[in-house]
Image (spheres, rainbow, N blue to C red):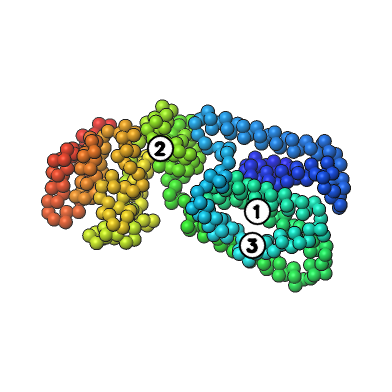
Amino acid sequence: MFFFFLAMSMKISAGISVVALFCIYVMNVFSIIKFKENEKLFPKKLWQLLPFIIIFIIIGSWVYYAKLYNSRNGCGYFSTTIYPIWETKYSSIATIIEYIKNLWLNQYFHKYTLWFFLSAFLVNIFLMKKNKTLLISLNLLELIGSILYSILWFITFQQHDYYTINLYILLVFTVLTFSEAMNRLFPKICSNIFIKTILIVFLVFNVYHTSIQIKHRYTGWWTEYPKFKDFHTITPYLRSIGITRNDTVISIPDQSHHTLYLMNQPGWTECFGLNKDSNSIAKSIERGAKYLIVASKDWHPEKTVHFEKWPRHCVQGTKGAELHPDLKKEKISQIVLKGALDQEEGYSVFEGIDIDLEKFLKDNEVNELYITGLVTEYCVKETAIDAAKRGFTTFVIKEAVEGVELNAGDVEKAFKEMEKAGVRVISSSDING
């Protein structure tokens, strides 16, 4: 019971097995079902009820605390509600089913292994009267619990196998019941060395399949390390500029909350709808946030009209699309992806597809913009003029931009066009602080 308690403490869905055992206790104590193989499954009724009571009280108290924490801090970091299937759009249901079928199941079990589990479960049902009552009861209770859990928390299956992995306890009881029945009904066959060898090979085969899938997952298609690698090393820098362990921070754009863990800082991200508008960010500012820094970068697809004029560059997902390694990326609060569609040039940062930048800046009461980057005659010029037209006081730092000079005088011409539009071209020495 202690291990069940630990499991529920980390993930409450692990309680499916505890609830199943509690139902067995109730059925046995009140003689609802007689377990032929062991009539006195719980001989010390009250003492054996105590572990269940302790577990339910402690876990219940933890859920209450989590709800209280969410309420007091205006967040939903602790999930204490249901996400039922009836609140899911029909199109989303189909998508989630595809996730379950093609990702979560395949990550751990080869399709042949899944067929084996299904066959074993059907055999258990067929041999219900010959199976031990305790095992078959646990199978059915685990099945009912898994179905109810899947219905009530269906939406979460789209997010991560974190929410599905506890359902695999049903497979454990299925194989246990099947093995016990086969050993009891067909002892000679089960003791045959050839049969044992086949089972061992089958097990090794599935372990190999799973190891390949997991390795490919965490070093390939699902690795998020490149996206969050700067957060892994940001803590010493935060300390060096005076941000202490107890200072509250905002991390945006950031739909996760594990970045706060990586930074070793309390605070908020955009997770659960926080910091999405001026009112929400204003509350965070009141709690200590001081600066909002916005960066943009080209994010071109493999094929784009942009490459008809320019050499291939900044292709999505490649090293060329990354920010310069010497840039202090830990100070960046927002990255805007531009030029990301195949039919757009994407010179101005205000053409970014992932955010309404003008609204974002004005919601956060940003009035002045300092433009740096590449290239002067195109992205810098278009961004600066675009910003001035939208009412921002706009500065271009002359030493922090670079042109390509396709024709002599193009850079100076670009500076004049920007100044004509109301942009101030300044030197870095003109900036106070």
| Label of residue 168 in the image | 1
Q: Mark 1 and mark 3 in contact? Answer it, CB < 8 Å.
A: no
List the single residue furthest toward the top: 286
Query: Along the polypeptide, which appears first: circle 3 or circle 2?
Result: 3
Of residues 14 and 343, the one nearer the viewer is: 343
Q: Which residue is the site of mark 3? A: 114
Q: How many marks?
A: 3
Q: Position of residue 160 (x, y in %)?
A: 54, 50
Q: Position of residue 391 (x, y in %)?
A: 23, 36
Looking at the rendering, which quadrant does residue 415 occupy? top left
Q: Secondary structure at mark 3?
A: helix
**Callout 1, which amino acid?**
Tyr
Q: Residue at x 45, y 43 (%)?
A: 255
Q: Residue at x 85, y 39 (%)?
A: 44
Q: Secondary structure at mark 2?
A: loop
Q: Residue at x 13, y 43 (%)?
A: 416
- Crowding at mark 1 (Cα within 10 Å: few <14, some 14-19, many 20+): some
Quarter of the image that includes the N terminus: top right
Going by the image, does 82 lie left or right of 41? left
Mark 1–mark 3 Cα distance, whole angstroms, equals 11 Å
Is residue 39 visible in the rendered image? The answer is yes
Relative to 110, say whether 416 is above or below: above
Q: Mark 2 and mark 1 in contact? Answer it, CB < 8 Å.
A: no
- Crowding at mark 2 (Cα within 10 Å: few <14, some 14-19, many 20+): some
